[in-house]
Amino acid sequence: MIYRTDTYWEDRYNQEGIKTPVSKNVHPQDKYDEKIGNDCKIINDSLEPLFKATSVDLAIDCGCGCGRLTPVLFRYGKKIKGFDISPKAISLADGFVGYFSKPVEFICSPLTSIPLEDGISGLSLSWTVLQHISDPDEWKKAIDEIQRVVKVNGVILTYDNVEWNLNRMKNPEVKVPEHMSIKSANDYLFAFDRCDCLHQKMYNKHVLTVLRKVK
């Protein structure tokens, strides 16, 4: 069966609900809350030195899912927009909007075609999203779209699993799940070819990359 990003994630959100795509071992509520807290800490530790007391007009959550990390952007953006390919995920995210302290709009859209004008956002977050675009051409197209909608001097933060690249380096015969990319940390740096890297760090099997758009 051929992996299709749209149907795969729609099926998972319909089956697993708001905790998609968090791994099953952190589905108990206390473990889930702990993971969200840890993820937010990594994001804030990376962004706070860059923004300090300032904020951008628009921050975007690319591959927002059900919006579990979207509130972390509140301190950095005056308005927030989240994008996800799954209608079910967007429906779940919309259920939280009334509880948010800032204007948030969730939009169903693939990252290969983000419905925003060029250079409109000052900050883009994509958290464990690009790792799930296994087609190399689509992966680069999504990255180019993120770069397109972020303004010059804007910040892009990505966080993705590079475990399968590391595994393949050890054993070329290792089987990679169809929904996982095999990109390396350097692949992310080279693909964001309109940006300079401000910071890149490994967290277990994930690579955090913080970039500033320069052209």
Image (tube, helix red, strand yellow):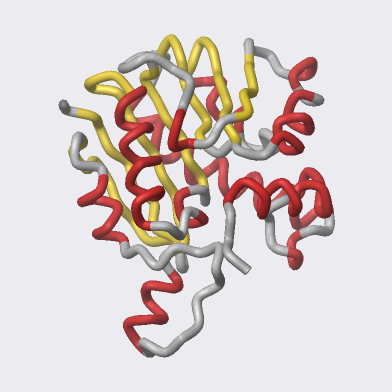
- How many marks do you count on the picture? 0
The residue sitting at 78% across, 43% down in the picture is: 18
* Residue 50 sits above or below residue 57 on the image: below
In the picture as drawn, the residue positioned furthest to the front comes out as 1
Q: Depth check: give the residue in front, 2 or 10.
A: 2
Q: Is residue 129 left or right of residue 15?
A: left
Image quarter (top left, top right, bottom left or bottom right) of the C terminus = top left
* Residue 174 sits above or below residue 135 on the image: below
Image quarter (top left, top right, bottom left or bottom right) of the N terminus = bottom right
The residue sitting at 53% across, 43% down in the picture is: 41
The residue sitting at 36% across, 19% down in the picture is: 122
Q: Position of residue 61 (x, y in %)?
A: 52, 31
Q: Depth check: give the residue in front, 77 or 54.
A: 77
Q: Depth check: give the residue in front, 215 or 72.
A: 215
The residue sitting at 55% across, 72% down in the picture is: 177
Q: Which of the 4 image quarters holds residue 145?
A: top left
Q: Is residue 60 left or right of residue 93?
A: left
Q: Position of residue 75 (x, y in %)?
A: 52, 20
Q: Position of residue 88 (x, y in %)?
A: 76, 37
